[in-house]
Image (cartoon, coloured by chain):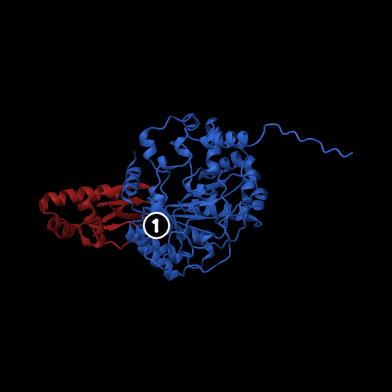
Chain colours: A blue, B red
């Protein structure tokens, strides 16, 4: 175990919020087809409010801070916030589309000691990228910014969300990232809109295509282990937890709302009304999330994948129960290993038991 | 005998967790944890206070250690952190690099 993993585990065990994702705005200059956000401003925190939150986060022990949005540079005070965060000695990561980053901004980001810039790019083809972001010339602007940032010596990661519209482009985009000397990550997760609208899920890659993605050695490190059939869960596995949400990680919205995670829309308090540490320590919602062990999961506790599944409790919550299965992750486990999940078997049994396999409808004959 | 001055690099992130100071250099993602004594030295690294004075006031007084040994250990510690870009070391006072 690396030293960093050891410290992360220590934070998890002690219940210290070592990592926080803070969206400073939901406003954005792009309108990505798969985005789950409402981009109107419903009363963002002011500069002073966010600085106050940062002070509280530092005191609470937060080390890893991700600034994201919306587009962070839509806030004119973003550098002011960034400077404040760095004065408070956070390890800062920025997620951005980078279209507003030029040489001067790249220099300032560098001088402030930012750890990583993650930039959304969807294709090596400008027309495909621009069709997804719905912002003309966004590909060219983003690529220029990546070069400025890279030339400053910053660690840049191209993050590609895989969906039906760009599925065939990941190989070339990965190659482009390598040629530019920047990192590359790919993620096939599409989440429902924050208001519960699930229409964006139609953009998800169909199952058969997921198999190809998961079995692509260029995309998956240690593919043999990644795609191996699940091992039978041990008692220790059933004592385990899904992820770090509410244990050592949480999410704060531009309006000050605190959630267990970015994709776990369970309101757990608001930093405009309560101190962050009071929410972290006392919120009944965060306590409930924290209490759920694998053995408490309604379907997944009996699933052979329970130890290796990427089950997201937030996606499960959006499906109806934070203790239930997350269908998207069931599909990932299945297409990764070829072994059906307990949830899939249950749904199949329900379907088979609930209706005849062949339906024969007598013809209505009128005489 | 010349003095040694130490200052924290501007590329550093740091936070205390369960009595240990986590320190990370954003330039190369080097990650360290510092024990109590090392943390005291690191926190006092303002670029203006000589290392000898830091050791005397922050280490010997607070941790009840032998001054000579403490000075030698501190010199080694400072040299190691400077090779990783976490501390800047000079025989002249340094301007603070803090962001």
- Circle 1 packing at 10 Å, graded few (<14), some (14-19), many (20+), is few
**Where, quadrant-wise, is the N terminus of chain A in this rendering?**
top left
Residue A113 in view in this figure? no
Name the spot of residue B22 as percent of width and height, x first: 30, 51
Q: Is residue A52 left or right of residue A349?
A: left
**Pointer 1 residue:** A284
Figure disc tally = 1
Single out the residue that lies furthest toward the right: A367
Secondary structure beneath dot 1 equals helix
The C terminus of chain A is located in which quarter? top right
| Residue A206 placement, left or right of B12 | right
- Residue A132 seen in this snapshot: yes
Instruction: Kindly identify the residue that appears in the image at 11 percent across and 54 percent down.
Output: B64
Question: Please, is residue B36 above or below residue A226 in the view?
Answer: below
Counting from the top left corner in percent of width and height, residue A202 is at 64, 47
> Closer to the camera, A307 or B93?
A307
A26 or A276: which is nearer to us? A276
Q: Chain of mark 1?
A: A
The image position of residue A361, as x and y in percent, is 76, 36
* Above-or-below relation of A52 to A163: below
Give the residue displayed 56% in from the left and 41% down from the top.
Answer: A174
Q: In the displayed structure, would residue B14 be above or below residue A307? A: below
The residue sitting at 40% across, 66% down in the picture is A51
Residue reaching furthest front?
Answer: A367
Q: Nearer the viewer, residue B63 or A175?
A: B63
In which quarter of the view is residue A85 placed?
A: bottom left
Quarter of the figure with residue A175: top right
């Amino acid at each position: 175990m690396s030293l960093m993993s050891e410290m992360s585990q220590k934070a998890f065990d002690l219940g210290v919020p070592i990592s926080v994702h803070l969206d400073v705005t939901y406003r954005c200059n792009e309108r990505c087809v798969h985005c789950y956000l409402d981009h109107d401003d419903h009363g963002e925190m002011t500069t002073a409010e966010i600085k106050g939150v940062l002070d509280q986060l530092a005191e609470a022990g937060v080390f890893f801070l991700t600034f994201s949005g919306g587009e962070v540079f839509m806030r004119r005070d973003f550098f002011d916030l960034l400077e404040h965060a760095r004065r408070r000695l956070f390890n800062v990561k920025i997620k951005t589309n980078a279209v507003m980053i030029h040489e001067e901004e790249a220099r300032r980001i560098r001088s402030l000691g930012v750890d990583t810039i993650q930039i959304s790019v969807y294709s090596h083809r400008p027309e495909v990228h621009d069709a997804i972001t719905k912002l003309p010339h966004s590909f060219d602007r983003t690529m220029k910014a990546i070069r400025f940032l890279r030339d400053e010596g910053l660690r840049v990661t191209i993050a590609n969300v895989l969906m039906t519209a760009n599925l065939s482009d990941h190989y070339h985009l990965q190659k482009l990232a390598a040629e530019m000397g920047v990192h590359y990550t790919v993620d096939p997760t599409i989440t429902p809109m924050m208001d519960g609208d699930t229409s964006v899920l139609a953009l998800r890659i169909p199952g058969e295509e997921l198999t190809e993605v998961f079995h692509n050695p260029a995309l998956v490190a240690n593919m043999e282990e990644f795609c191996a059939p699940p091992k039978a869960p041990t008692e220790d596995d059933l004592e385990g937890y899904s992820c770090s949400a509410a244990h050592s990680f949480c999410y704060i919205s531009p309006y000050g709302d605190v959630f267990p995670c970015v994709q776990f829309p369970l309101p757990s308090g608001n930093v405009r009304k309560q101190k962050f540490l009071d929410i972290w320590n006392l919120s009944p919602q965060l306590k409930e999330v924290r209490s759920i062990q694998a053995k408490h999961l309604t379907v997944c506790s009996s699933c052979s994948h329970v130890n290796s599944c990427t089950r997201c409790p937030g996606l499960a919550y959006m499906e109806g129960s934070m203790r239930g299965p997350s269908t998207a992750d069931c599909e990932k486990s299945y297409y990764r290993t070829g072994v059906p999940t307990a949830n899939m078997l249950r749904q199949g049994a329900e379907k088979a038991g609930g209706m005849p396999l062949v339906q024969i409808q007598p013809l209505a004959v009128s005489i | 005998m010349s003095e040694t001055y130490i200052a924290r690099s501007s590329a550093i992130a740091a936070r205390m967790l369960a009595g240990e100071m986590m320190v990370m250099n954003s330039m190369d993602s080097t990650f360290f944890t510092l024990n109590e004594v090392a943390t005291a030295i690191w926190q006092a690294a303002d670029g203006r206070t000589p290392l000898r004075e830091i050791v005397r006031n922050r280490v010997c007084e607070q941790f009840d250690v032998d001054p000579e040994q403490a000075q030698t250990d501190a010199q080694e510690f400072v040299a190691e952190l400077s090779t990783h870009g976490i501390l800047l070391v000079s025989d002249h006072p340094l301007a603070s690099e803090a962001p």
